[in-house]
Image (spheres, coloured by chain):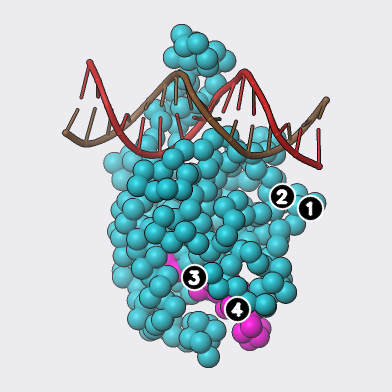
Chain colours: A cyan, B brown, C red
Amino acid sequence: MECNSLERSLGLYPYSTEAFSTIETNQKPSEVGGVIVGSDIDGSSETLATLNSSITFSSSTEAGAVEVSGKRKKDGDVKGEGRESSKKRIKGKKKGEKKQNEPRFVFITKSEIDHLDDGYRWRKYGQKAVKNSPYPRSYYRCTTQKCIVKKRVERSFQDPTTVLTSYEGQHNHHVPSSLKPNVPAKVFTTTPTLFSDTTNRSNFTQDLHHHMHNNNHNLNSLMFHNNNMQQSINTTASAFEGSIYSHNNNINNYLLQQFNNHQNIPQEYGLLQDVVPSIVHGS
DNA sequence: CGCCTTTGACCCGCGC
DNA sequence: GCGCGGGTCAAAGGCG
């Protein structure tokens, strides 16, 4: 994995040169997608090499479908009763809590480590093997009281250097001040582009990697696929605002903030070239 | 001792 | 109905 001295100097390593992020929210999966390519705003492109991000949207609000990936638990069903008859599970937990229409933000990060320090404290509560993947998926919950944010972390089997981190829920607290993650201080601009089809997780990942690789070679080829991009951005950005406190204190929040900064990106992608960071072009 | 990870069991929805 | 896959629980153990 490419990791230059700059990254190290910035404290980004071993997080990688490319941190991709995606968003799964209430948009039709096939309708929109986005890639946010990082670039530093002050023109000092060197930092830029440290962080690229991408955002995509998918949804599942149609016909009451809620879960973006994975199966949904039954609505409002408290699984206590069922558990009581078993030898374990006698406490009647809130398992089966309905997954609401909360957007899930998926960050694709190139990293050698699975659990990136994003500034929050997480407790791992489960791990499952992922079908067709040698890498397990880990489940984390925010340890802050009354904070119900969860996140899942899994490594892409297609590109083992890529870690998919999906966040679900809203932090109702600030980033613990004592837990500052490694994040470059510079500000990046972002550029949305697209993912073709995020109907299912597998396709999503494939597309993501496809675009990741293509983007590295020719960002100019990226285009918006539909006219709903702006709407999607606004929708998702709003979700972000209510979802996570932005303090520039952690990578993911940072990306979210940058995403918000680009709500007014024109629909026509013709302008993309103008905002594509030079670093990506290799210049 | 508190916090966290590990891990097997359990529950649920879905497809066949 | 059954099996599968995904998600969660919670006991047990590790670690600082």
Q: Is residue A39 magenta?
A: yes
Q: Give the distance between the C-alpha atoms of the residues marked 2 and 3, in whole angstroms.
A: 25 Å
- Few, some or many residues within 10 Å of mark 3 (<14, 14–19, 20+): many
> For the residue carrying disc 1, how many other residues have a C-alpha within 10 Å: few (<14), some (14-19), or many (20+)?
few
Mark 2 sits on what residue? A174
- Given contact means CB atoms under 8 Å apart, are the residues at marks 1 and 2 in contact? yes
Same subunit, tags 1 and 4:
yes
Residue that carries the numbered disc 3 in the rendered image: A36
Q: Give the range drawn in magenta.
A: A31-53
Q: Which chain carries label 4?
A: A
Q: In which quarter of the image is residue A11?
A: bottom right
The amino acid sitting under disc 1 is Ser
**Left or right: A266 as drawn, with respect to A19:** left
Give the percent coordinates (x, y) of residue A177: 79, 53
Which residue is more in the foreground, A167 or A229? A167
Please tell me which of labels 2 and 4 falls first in the chain: 4
Precedes in sequence: disc 3 or disc 4: 3
Percent across and percent down for residue C4 are 30, 33
Q: Which mark is residue A48?
A: 4
- Give me the disc on residue A177: 1
Q: Which amino acid does label 3 sit on?
A: Ile
